[in-house]
Amino acid sequence: MGQIVPAAGVESTLMNETALLKRITVNPKIFGGKPIVRGRRLAVEHILGMLAAGDTVDDLLRAYPWLEREDVLACLAYARRVVGHERIEPAITDEAA
């Protein structure tokens, strides 16, 4: 039997996604423990809602000067995993930003 070889770039994509997901955290003191971006008071669902409403990544970056493009990509990766019913364990913090 032949060996199954992942498509080119699949492994690096998964590694990149894992790194991106480290940007998504939860803090019981912020928004009742909803997923947030890098421990800040910006919920993943807010970013997704803005994108769904037609805002661009550049719009988001202008609206939140501290936000990075990778943060938005992390929100999309998080949403993909949630929709795919994959297990997600964001880092829990107790530091208020």
Image: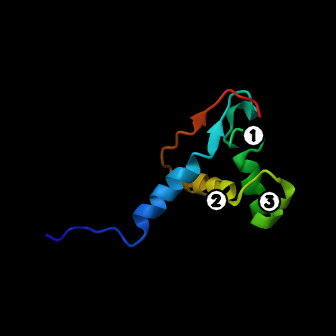
* Above or below, 34 relative to 48: above
- The residue under label 2 is 73
Label 3, residues with CA under 10 Å away: few <14, some 14-19, many ≥20: some
Q: Secondary structure at mark 1?
A: loop
Tell me if 92 is positioned left or right of 46 in this view: left
Sequence order check, earlier mark of 1 and 2: 1
Q: Secondary structure at mark 2?
A: helix
Q: Residue at x 57, y 45 (%)?
A: 22
- The residue under label 1 is 40
Asked if marks 1 and 2 touch (Cβ < 8 Å), the reply is no
Sequence order check, earlier mark of 2 and 3: 3
Label 2, residues with CA under 10 Å away: few <14, some 14-19, many ≥20: some
- Quadrant the C terminus occupies: top right
Q: Position of residue 21 (x, y in %)?
A: 57, 49
Residue kind at label 3, given as amino acid type = Leu
Residue kind at label 1, given as amino acid type = Arg
Distance between the Cα atoms at labels 1 and 2? Answer: 16 Å
Q: Residue at x 53, y 39 (%)?
A: 89
Residue kind at label 2, given as amino acid type = Leu
Distance between the Cα atoms at labels 2 and 3? Answer: 12 Å
Give whichever of 30, 32 is nearer the camera: 30
Outermost residue, right side: 63
Asked if marks 2 and 3 touch (Cβ < 8 Å), the reply is no
Asked if marks 3 and 1 touch (Cβ < 8 Å), the reply is no
Report if residue 84 is visible in the image.
no
Tell me if 72 is positioned left or right of 9 in this view: right
Q: Position of residue 56 (x, y in %)?
A: 78, 67
Outermost residue, left side: 1
* Above or below, 54 relative to 23: below
* Above or below, 27 relative to 77: above
- The residue under label 3 is 61
